[in-house]
Image (cartoon, helix red, strand yellow):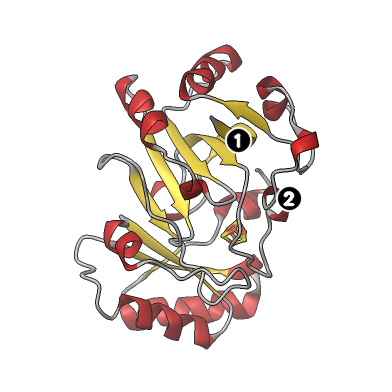
Amino acid sequence: MYKVNEIFETIQGEGNYTGTPAIFVRLQGCPVGCSWCDTKHTWEIPADLSIDLWQATQKKADSEHWADATADDLLALFSARGYRAQHVVITGGEPCMYDLNPLCELLHHHGMSTQIETSGTFEILAPEQTWVTVSPKVNMRGGYAVLRSTLQRANEIKHPVAMEKHVDELKALLQDIDVSGKLIYLQPISQKAKATQLAIEFCKANNWRLSVQVHKYLGIN
Ligand code: SF4
């Protein structure tokens, strides 16, 4: 069973798949503890806040309510909701707290592509075809380390940046990783002008890419 906070169809606004219509499945639960997290409502899994899966597609505001779902339940729901997107982004929370193989394999079998957005602090259990976005969370309150295996598995590494020390963190993480074939992004935290300028400068200096969370500029989910 996956514990699902919300499901919605939108346009992917970050990284390599920017601009791609996508179904987002936000899973419940995350112990990583980033102070600037914008999905703190996914951290806990309150036993008394379970809801029907259909309700998870109709949330009008962030809430800690969650629904149990199997991979088959989710596929059936996409169809029932009339979603047209063929790309599914599994996010959280920390989605890699779950074994994502059953869900990704089922979706691939039905011709869909999958993407995981993870902090890199849990082993990634997903098929090889799944696009893995690691957004490394370093020295957060939960005390979880970014795993070398997740950086090696990543198709793209998208690092949140607000100050120069975050760039240093990324360089330290990448030191022993073979980055050939991987896309490296800096993503300014919270669209702050200073963070954006910093990210632009370091992208140019290192030949990395800039990810600007297009959906936030557009005011969509
Ligand atoms: S890993 Fe993601 S969901 Fe978890 S606390 Fe950090 S930003 Fe929030």
Depth order, front residue of 87/33: 33
Q: Which residue is mark 2?
A: 41
User: Which quadrant of the figure shows ligand 1?
Assistant: bottom right
x, y percent for residue 177: 25, 72
Q: Residue at x 36, y 77 (%)?
A: 173
Q: Residue at x 51, y 87 (%)?
A: 165
Q: Earlier in the sequence, mark 1 or mark 2?
A: 1
Q: Within 8 Å of ligand 1, the CB of disc 2?
A: no
Q: Which residue is mark 1?
A: 3
Asked if 31 appears above or below 50 in the picture, the reply is below
x, y percent for residue 118: 47, 54
Q: Is residue 60 visible?
A: no
Asked if 194 appears above or below 211 in the picture, the reply is below
x, y percent for residue 96: 46, 49
Looking at this view, name the residue that lies furthest to the front: 47
Crowdedness near tag 1: few (<14), some (14–19) or many (≥20) residues, C-alpha within 10 Å: many
Looking at this view, name the residue that lies furthest to the top: 80
Q: Residue at x 65, y 66 (%)?
A: 190
Determine whether, in the image, residue 31 is placed left or right of residue 41. left
Determine whether, in the image, residue 162 is placed left or right of residue 146. right
Quadrant housing residue 113: top left
